[in-house]
Image: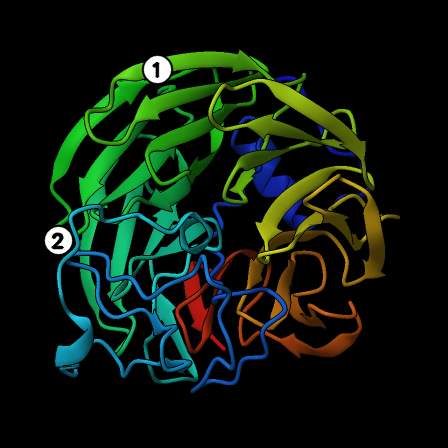
Amino acid sequence: MRHALAESVTRASRWRALFFGSVVIALSVVGVCSARSSMSESAVSSCPSRLQRTTVVGVGQPANCETGALNPAMNQSVSSNTAAISDPFPNLLQIATLHWYQANQAGISVRVGRLPWGVAFDGSDLWVTNSGSGTVTRLAASTAEVMGTYRVGGHPEGIAFDGSSMWVVDNGSNAVTELAASNGRVVGTYRVGTFPVGIAFDGTDVWVANQGAGTLTRLAAATGRLLGTYHVGTDPENLAFDGTYLWVTNPGSDDVIKVEASTGAVVGTYQVGRSPFGVAFDGTDVWVTNADVGSDSVTRLAASNGAIVGTYPVGINPFGVAFDGSSIWVANGGTDTVTKLDASTGSTIGTYRLPSGEPVGLAFDGTNVWVADGTDRLAKL
């Protein structure tokens, strides 16, 4: 393990120490057609030409860019938007913002496994890695009913969805396990680098941050075949995809590295705050949580050139970060709160105390934000 947080990092850090000193924020950030398009819970006002209506086969109904409205929840039939497409991922911005569609309901806290960490949404269900149990829990987003619990290794953290499978990082075995999203069946387990933590999907391939090796591993999502290993610094932690590039947080060097997804080449390195961990893309900018006490902020970088747009205070030890189409949500592990920021201005909209404590990972399901916390629960805001 190449990195240790400053002694001032609080309860979330003690989890990290318990499990070999690592943090991964397996984020599932859900965007809409453009980061700067206004969005309510029921409508999206406009869509750029590159974001035409798409349907991911077997996943559900997306935003309808032809009419500017979100389709109904997935258990309702919308015959005009259900035509299968030959290429399930024609829209890289949809993949980059992890726009996996709409769900319903609110105000729930559900017990999952021990020390839940990463959260991902598949268009219908929430998947949570339980880092202390070696399992993944699946819940229906519409009802919060637990649909299954699946063993995936010794210490699962990062999790990502590729349209048909969930990919789960296990840093206890230096491997990634692929689960069929339809039933939780293990499709395959693939070796990666030393101490893998973060993971992201780019529309074709799966990328894994190997914190212990200072590398990214690239796997073909269709087969699990190893496509390459790329050096990205001393302490890669978490990843986000922006449609063309991967953004990798490096808490050991307080920077973010920009990697070209087509080649694996590093094209830029950008200083942010201390101990950057979580990272999310909003369609235009990249948001990075600076988790060390004294930073306690989110840095916003222009995806086009890495320039700092702004740095915004949040709670103590911000870890997970997610985009909901108009706002940025940040899990503050040291204050048991979640902060909501306006994505256009960075101003604080609100800070919300969880019914339980120590939030880590976040995901947006099209309507609500789900937060994994240190009391072995998944809360729905």
Asked if 288 appears above or below 337 in the picture, the reply is above
Crowd around label 1: few <14 · some 14–19 · many ≥20 (10 Å): few
- Nearest the eye: 216 or 99: 99
Q: Residue at x 54, y 80 (%)?
A: 39
Three-letter amino acid code at disc 1? Leu
Q: In which image quadrant can residue 137 be found?
A: bottom left
Q: Is residue 322 visible?
A: yes
- Nearest the eye: 320 or 81: 81
Label at residue 329: none
Q: Position of residue 238 (x, y in %)?
A: 56, 36
Q: Which residue is mark 1?
A: 227
Count the marks. 2
Q: In which image quadrant can residue 156 be found?
A: top left
Whether residue 180 sits left or right of residue 368 in the image: it is left
Q: Secondary structure at mark 2?
A: loop
Q: Residue at x 52, y 85 (%)?
A: 40
Whether residue 193 sits left or right of residue 294 in the image: it is left
Cα distance between the residues tagged 2 and 1: 26 Å
Three-letter amino acid code at disc 2? Ser
Q: Is residue 113 visible?
A: no
Quadrant where the N terminus sits is: top right
- Nearest the eye: 244 or 145: 244
Q: Position of residue 5 (x, y in %)?
A: 74, 33
Whether residue 280 sits left or right of residue 269 in the image: it is left
Q: Badges 2 and 1: C-beta atoms under 8 Å apart?
A: no
Q: Position of residue 26 (x, y in %)?
A: 48, 45
Q: Residue at x 55, y 34 (%)?
A: 246
Q: Residue at x 66, y 69 (%)?
A: 337
Asked if 280 appears above or below 262 in the picture, the reply is below
Kindly report which numbered mark, 2 or 1, lies closer to the viewer in this rendering: 1
Q: Which residue is mark 2?
A: 182
